[in-house]
Image (cartoon, grey):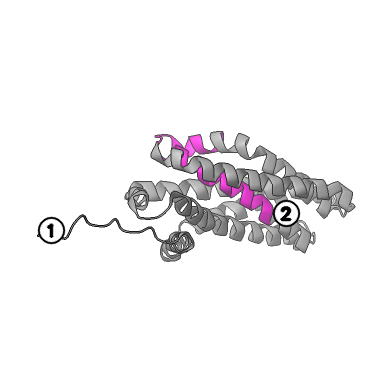
Amino acid sequence: MSAGPRKLRPLMPTWRAVLAIAWKDVRAELRGRELVSAMLLFTLITVLVFSLALELDANARRDAAAGVLWVTVAFAGILGLGRSLSAEYDRGSLDALLLAPIARSALFFGKLVGNLLFVLITALLLLVLLSVLFNLALVQPLLVLVVLLGCIGFTTSGTLIASMSVHARAREALLPVLLLPVALPVLIAAVRASGAIINDLPSDDWLPWLELLAAADVLFLAAAVALFDYVVEE
């Protein structure tokens, strides 16, 4: 006699699924070293170009540092986001992840944690490079906090947009076209907060931008979790 209908495999706890997906991305990168290497090389070349092209005095370098920082983070982040999710799609592992017994939110947060780690590594190295080449003290707690919040907002929106564009033929060209307008509030707030901190302005000049940046992060996280199911189904 039949033992009855087979029970469905239970969902893996969300936190375990998030850590497993993020750790899978980290292990793949440790083996291949393609994603972070490309991002770091792009960052190094961009900073060298800016430092050689902008022959500025000390005050002008201080004013330009925030813009150079976030332009480089944005384009290096786009490069990393595009390569991360397109590699999953090309190998067929993205479909396998969608069929796994995990919540879709766990899949999103797992990819988000992995992408955020790579972008943060690039951004922190960028702070060190700019400190050396622009002769500025950029490695300071407040600026690191702005970088963290800015990277969270940018990577959250980027992970969602990259999930939407991964099926397109021209996904490398489509990703920045879709992502930059969406991430513009995060980038503007990050640039203004960073510029005020670098120029040692009072807290009234950078605190509202920092609060706006934190609010944008929360909004993007909530929107991404709400929309991710519909994005990956398409």
Indicate left or right for 2 with 130 as reference: left
Q: Position of residue 200 (x, y in %)?
A: 87, 55
Q: Amino acid at mark 1?
A: Ser
Q: Position of residue 111 (x, y in %)?
A: 48, 53
- Residue 32, compared with residue 83, is above or below; it is below
- Residue 95, compared with residue 148, is above or below; it is above
Q: Which mark is residue 2?
A: 1
Q: Position of residue 59 (x, y in %)?
A: 86, 50
Q: Which mark is residue 146?
A: 2
Q: Amino acid at mark 2?
A: Val
> Start and end of the magenta stretch?
148-177
Q: Do we see residue 50 in this rendering?
A: no
Where disc 1 sits, the SS reads loop
Indicate left or right for 234 with 215 as reference: left
Indicate whether residue 161 is drawn in magenta. yes
Q: Position of residue 213 (x, y in %)?
A: 72, 47
Q: Residue at x 40, y 36 (%)?
A: 234
Q: Residues within 10 Å of mark 1 (few under 14, many from 20)?
A: few
Indicate left or right for 20 with 130 as reference: left
Q: Main secondary structure of the magenta part?
A: helix
Indicate whether residue 44 is drawn in magenta. no
Indicate left or right for 105 with 144 as reference: left
Q: Nearer the viewer, residue 225 or 88?
A: 225
Q: Nearer the viewer, residue 214 or 194?
A: 214
